[in-house]
Image (cartoon, rainbow, N blue to C red):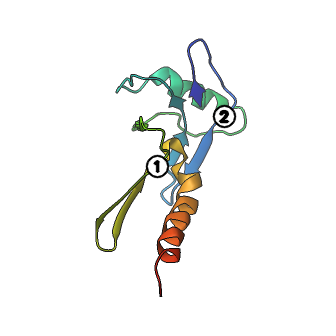
């Protein structure tokens, strides 16, 4: 859920259930130059309110919350690729899109490495 100043969207949400029946809900994003490190309950409540439009939870209590901060590089690059040791590479910089883009980015990075080597 993207939340901008003066905006209260209630048309997006995600739900995932694990093998013990616990439900993870989300997901919200706030954008800006300064990040507030504290969770905002009103955003969690907006997500629950939306999810109630198409599902029913036995218990709406939130047990645990977290937030992630996605730093952005100032040099215009979209990802950071650093080989820290032979066979070990850190690839980062996808912001909140890691689940969607990570496999494709890794495929490109690895493909570029192997195509530049003479076998």
Which mark is drawn over residue 112?
none
Q: Is residue 58 visible?
A: yes
Q: Residue at x 42, y 23 (%)?
A: 33
As rendered, which of 100 and 108 lies closer to the eye?
A: 108
Q: Please state the horizontal and vertical placement of residue 75, each as a whole percent of the image.
A: 43, 38
Secondary structure of the residue carrying numbered label 1: loop
N-terminal of the pair, mark 1 or mark 2, is 2
Q: Residue at x 57, y 40 (%)?
A: 58
Q: Please state the horizontal and vertical placement of residue 110, each as a whole percent of the image.
A: 49, 70
Q: Which residue is mark 1?
A: 79
> In the shown orientation, is residue 106 left or right of residue 38?
right
Q: Residue at x 39, y 22 (%)?
A: 34
Q: Residue furthest bottom?
A: 119
Q: Up-down: is 81 above or below 12?
A: below
Secondary structure of the residue carrying numbered label 2: loop
Q: Residue furthest right?
A: 54
């Amino acid at each position: 859920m993207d939340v901008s100043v003066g905006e209260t969207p209630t048309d997006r949400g995600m739900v995932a259930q694990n093998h013990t029946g616990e439900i993870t809900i989300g997901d919200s994003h706030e954008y800006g130059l300064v990040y507030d490190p504290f969770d905002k309950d009103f955003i969690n409540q907006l997500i629950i309110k939306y999810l109630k439009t198409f599902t029913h939870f036995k218990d709406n209590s939130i047990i645990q919350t977290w937030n992630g901060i996605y730093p952005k590089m100032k040099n215009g690059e979209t990802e950071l690729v650093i080989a820290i040791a032979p066979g070990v590479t850190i690839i980062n910089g996808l912001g909140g899109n890691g689940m969607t883009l990570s496999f494709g980015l890794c495929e490109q990075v690895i493909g570029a490495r192997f195509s530049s080597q003479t076998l």
